[in-house]
Image (spheres, rainbow, N blue to C red):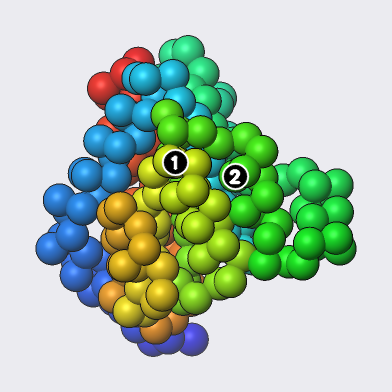
Amino acid sequence: MTDRIREGLEELADTAGALRSQADRIEAIGRRYIATLRNGGTLFFAGNGGSAAHAQHVAAEYVVRFTVDRRPFRAVALTTDSSVLTAAGNDLGFERVFARQVEALAGPRDLLVLHSTTGTSRNLLAAVEAARRIGTGVVALLGRDGGALAPLVDVAVVVPSDQTSRIQELHLAIEHLLVDMVERELA
């Protein structure tokens, strides 16, 4: 088991190291967060499964705090309202659960942030379409080859792995780098 643990840690370190080539893209996403918040906009986070949990976790970092006491930043996880999610899923279909919320809540000053390990989730693709119709910017943290989402968003960071666990681990690490960047700039 110790060998398996070492192997897993080495794999994680190697994948994280491969992200160095996308540092400029990560910074570009951070700059989008900063501009959105500075202009009175809201960061809207969405994802499925573990990525939904990340959306909630990250939104909390902006609303509450990350490393310093400061004013709250406007952030919402579109994964948390069970009544909206189940009503939209039942009445409109699961592929519309995020798009409907984007249509209701987002505007041109806001930013939609998508987390997806595959880049192929139909509900995230529909959310991008809804965001485009109302002029909301879209960025994404993706995995594998970026899937269908990568070319549809303004900026994408693609974790170069086929393993969901490694992708999710690094998405959270990237989001922590981003919230640190935002706090340093705006706090």
The picture places residue 36, in percent across and down from the top left corner, at 37, 29
For disc 1, the marked residue is 136
Does 181 sit left or right of 152 as displayed? Answer: left
**Callouts 1 and 2 close, C-beta under 8 Å:** yes
Q: Which residue is more in the foreground, 179 or 81?
A: 81
* Mark closest to the chain's N terminus, 1 or 2: 2
Specify the quadrant of the image occupied by residue 27: top left
In the drawing, what numbered circle is on residue 114?
A: none
The picture places residue 177, in percent across and down from the top left corner, at 31, 43
Q: Which residue is more in the foreground, 28 or 23?
A: 28
Residue sitting at x 41%, y 75%: 148
The picture places residue 56, in percent across and down from the top left corner, at 61, 45
Does residue 53 show up?
A: no
Residue sitting at x 66%, y 38%: 104
Residue sitting at x 40%, y 24%: 37
Label 1: few (<14), some or many (≥20) within 10 Å? many
Q: Relative to residue 96, is residue 40 depicted above or below?
A: above
Q: Which residue is more in the foreground, 62 or 97?
A: 97
Label 2: few (<14), some or many (≥20) within 10 Å? many
Does 72 sit left or right of 37 as displayed? Answer: right
Q: What secondary structure is found at the residue carrying circle 1?
A: loop
For disc 2, the marked residue is 102
Residue sitting at x 79%, y 56%: 88
The residues tagged by marks 1 and 2 sit, at their Cα atoms, a distance apart of 9 Å
Q: Hey, what amino acid is under mark 1?
A: Thr
Q: Which residue is more in the foreground, 37 or 92?
A: 92
Specify the quadrant of the image occupied by residue 33: top left
Q: Hey, what amino acid is under mark 2?
A: Val
Q: What secondary structure is found at the residue carrying circle 2?
A: helix
Does 115 sit left or right of 84 as displayed? Answer: left
The picture places residue 187, in percent across and down from the top left corner, at 35, 16
